[in-house]
Amino acid sequence: MSPRRSYDQYCSAARALDTVGDRWTLLIVRELLAGPRRYTDLHADLPGVSTDVLASRLKDMERDGLTTRRRLPPPGAAYVYELTARGQELLPVLQALGKWGEAELGERRPTDAVRAHWFALPLLRGLEGEGLVEVRLDEGEFHLFVGADGGPVYGHGPAPGEPDARLVLDVDTCMAVAQGELSVLEAVRAGRVDVSGDGALAKALREAEDSVTA
């Protein structure tokens, strides 16, 4: 376990960066906002990180009270990492950072990796209310826990159970939302998102669409 480096400044921002300012730490938090994950899953969804650095960061995060590690019962019998309550408090930090970084995205570079679930946080920023939302892209499926208070805020694959809303859209629309060029409501109104479902979230999105076509 690497010794903690410090800015040695009596400032809360400096103290926060002492803990989460290392390269990869906040992106590991982004992945763990989906709930418990195995080391191999984290490594697969963090292209570019070495196995040594990932292992070191996870140990540091456990030491600093951001994550815990536990062994799944049989037949899984694998270790998973998950955020503590302290780690989950970084969600608004990541959302603010993502909002600030919209202007930095620009066009996707040939070297840029992409995963469908990386659009979960930008979409969450544009949805109001509470409920389970399933999102379908050609690149994959994920689901969002809109208005979640603690626990995972998104997950991989189809929704666990009947979602309140299903959104079908393409990656270009997700990129436009992530870049701040379109809000979720604007994308719905422009016909770039197909909305289905009987929950309050689906009804609110359809009403926004109908208010333009009426």
Image (cartoon, rainbow, N blue to C red):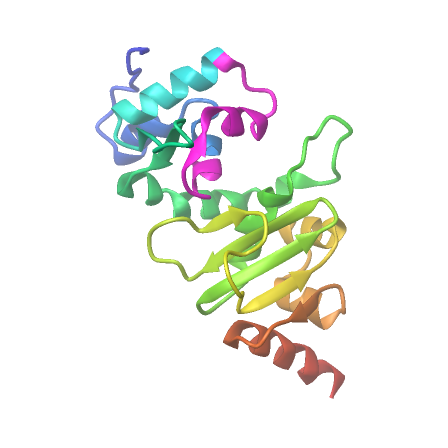
In the displayed structure, 163 sits above or below 180; it is below
Q: Quadrant of the N terminus?
A: top left
Q: In the displayed structure, does residue 25 sit left or right of residue 133?
A: left
Q: Position of residue 88 (x, y in %)?
A: 34, 44
Q: Which residues are magenta?
A: 29-51
**In front here: 77 or 100?**
77
The reply to whether the magenta stretch includes residue 47 is yes
Q: Position of residue 130 (x, y in %)?
A: 44, 67
Could you say which quadrant of the image residue 33 lies in? top left
**In front here: 38 or 92?**
38
The reply to whether the magenta stretch includes residue 11 is no
Q: In the displayed structure, does residue 43 sit left or right of residue 64?
A: right
Q: Position of residue 124 (x, y in %)?
A: 52, 56
Residue at point 45%, 69% (across, down): 129
Residue at point 51%, 56% (across, down): 144
**In front here: 106 or 24?**
24
